[in-house]
Image: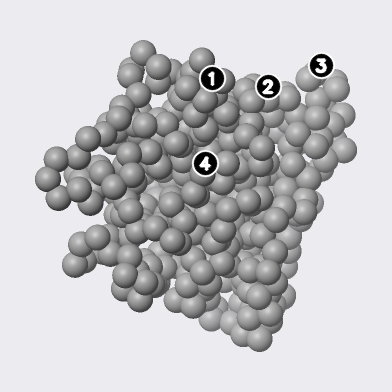
Amino acid sequence: MLNAISLLLAASLASQAPTRHRARDLGVPFDGTPGPLNAITDVAGVEVGFTTLIAGDGPLDVGKGPVRTGVTAILPRGKASTDPVMAGWFSMNGNGEMTGTTWIKEGGFLEGPVFITNTHSVGVVRDASIAWGLKHGAQLQPWSLPVVAETWDGVLNDINGFHVKPEHAFAALDGARGGPVAEGNVGGGTGMICYQFKCGTGTASRRLDAQAGGYTVGVLVQANHGSRSQLRIAGVPVGAEIPVTPARPRGGADEEIEQGSIIIVIATDAPLLPHQLERIARRAALGLGRTGATSGNGSGDIFIAFSTANAKAASTPDVASVQMLSNDRISAVFSATVQATEEAIVNALVAAETMTGAGGRLVEALPHDRLKELLKKYGR
């Protein structure tokens, strides 16, 4: 099984470009103007890396598999820079984890990458981040407080087998780059489910017009939330129209209850201070709500926003001069965040592919033809 994991890891790093459909390919309408890639990497300097681990089939054998998991790494200024970025975060519902956030709240800066993985691999990814930072001289302080977030993939993955290892976090970091971003069953999103369809990683962006400053907002989600009846796409009640049946899916994912969590990462080049970025992070909840979610008790819905503006503000030894977008101009960034978050979630649904995992559990992908029929039926 380890050889299978290694082979798939190499394949994951060799090609991160999306090869699957995206929501716009199916005619889903969205508000706003996307950037050229319609991805978080439309924000200059942002790099994304994945390690995808898929191995084994059949009954669950703790420690042996099947394995359906991975690691996602988002580097705000890429591997070439250790310059921190201003950041803010928000917990819509706290039944989840995002490490390092108390220092972000206190100090106002994100001092390294943002990682996303499965719930029981947060510790190993956190430690691997510190080791990678030491090797690459990427620590601002003598200590490190990495940001690692999680969602639970235990329906499809042998989550208690601890299959994510330090080398998988290293590979996600070393393989990170700009350009197109893969979606669906990749990285930390490999084994994830949302609205009781197969789901995972999704991304989108918005470009503000010149009058609003011409700034870019990019979003990446790891989506593992929601029950089927809640799902709405472009206002269409898709979940009600495609209800869960006894044959879809099996193994505990067919209950009409909140199934998991969502992590949302927002990047922008707009010059925003930490308190403003916390306001941006809160707006991701509105984009999530557009797809129908209500953040149930079992859902860890945690969002983080950072700005690549104001370079070197954290390393200035005395007084730093920084720019701040006025409150009178910030509403356009709010709107862009809501729009990109909504589309990133739908992209995660559309790109994901049907997966069979631990114990033969099957989680089906959102049927593209049926979605197109529903968009037509509802005049969307």
**In this rendering, is residue 52 above or below 83?**
below
Residue 25 place in picture, x, y as percent: 80, 37
Residue at left offset 77%, top offset 54%: 19
Q: Residues within 10 Å of mark 4 (few under 14, many from 20)?
A: many
- Amino acid type of the residue tagged 4 in the rendering: Val
For the residues marked 3 and 1, what is the alpha-carbon distance in whole angstroms? 32 Å
The residue at which mark 2 appears reads as 235
**In this rendering, is residue 349 above or below 375?**
below
The residue at which mark 3 appears reads as 379
- Amino acid type of the residue tagged 2 in the rendering: Gly
Residue at left offset 80%, top offset 30%: 27
Q: Residue 64 versus residue 53: which sits nearer the camera?
A: 53
Compare marks 1 and 2 and give the one earlier in the sequence.
1
- Amino acid type of the residue tagged 3 in the rendering: Gly
Answer yes or no: do the residues labelled 2 and 3 have beta carbons within 8 Å? no
- Amino acid type of the residue tagged 1 in the rendering: Ala
For the residues marked 4 and 3, what is the alpha-carbon distance in whole angstroms? 33 Å
User: Is 43 situated left or right of 9 in this image?
Assistant: left
Residue 243 place in picture, x, y as percent: 74, 37
Q: Secondary structure at mark 3?
A: loop
Compare marks 2 and 3 and give the one earlier in the sequence.
2
User: Is 91 situated left or right of 104 in this image?
Assistant: right
Dot in front, 1 or 2: 1
Q: Secondary structure at mark 1?
A: helix
Residue 154 place in picture, x, y as percent: 55, 62
The residue at which mark 1 appears reads as 210
Residue at left offset 64%, top offset 31%: 34
The residue at which mark 4 appears reads as 43
